[in-house]
Image: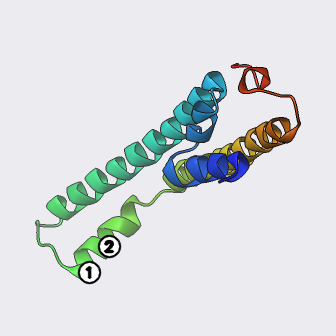
Amino acid sequence: MKKSLKGALLSGVVFPGFGQVVFRQYKRGIVLMLTVFAGLIVIVVTAVRQILAILEKIDLAGGVINTKTVTDAAAQVSSTSANLVYNLGLSFIVIFWIYGIVDAYRIGKKMDLEGSRPGLNTATRLPPQ
């Protein structure tokens, strides 16, 4: 398997930045991983806050759980700012995930080209960053 494809798959399927780490681009990989992880934390915290607010509204409505109670509580709790934070977090993750795939592919492609030249050994490939 070509390194370009391997790097793109690792960053796309496993986790953004994993392809960079495999290619010994540790700083890039760790920054990508932490960035996407921070976006995931923002989304989870926002979702948990909304869930807790919905449960509180249901409790105030008498604690009866049915479709109408849940729908009404969710409509009351849904705020524009919470949705904005969620959408920004999700956009942030998608953008950096795509960047990770493209960057890992680019690094792998460069390694593929350097490895296909005659006279090059593995020691002359990309230095770690």
Residue ID at (68%, 53%)? 5
Looking at the picture, how far across and down is residue 97, in whole percent?
A: 62, 48
Which residue of the protein is positioned furthest toward the front in this rendering? Answer: 119
Front position in the image: 6 or 97: 6
> Where is mark 1, residue-wise?
68
Front position in the image: 48 or 97: 97
Q: Are marks 1 and 2 in contact (CB under 8 Å)?
A: yes
Q: Which amino acid, mark 1?
A: Lys
> Where is mark 2, residue-wise?
72
Q: Residues within 10 Å of mark 2 (few under 14, many from 20)?
A: some
Q: Is residue 88 visible?
A: no
Looking at the picture, how far across and down is residue 65, in whole percent?
A: 15, 73
Q: Is 67 placed above or below 9 here?
A: below
Q: Which amino acid, mark 2?
A: Asp
Residue ID at (52%, 56%)? 83
Front position in the image: 116 or 25: 116
Element marked by disc 2: helix
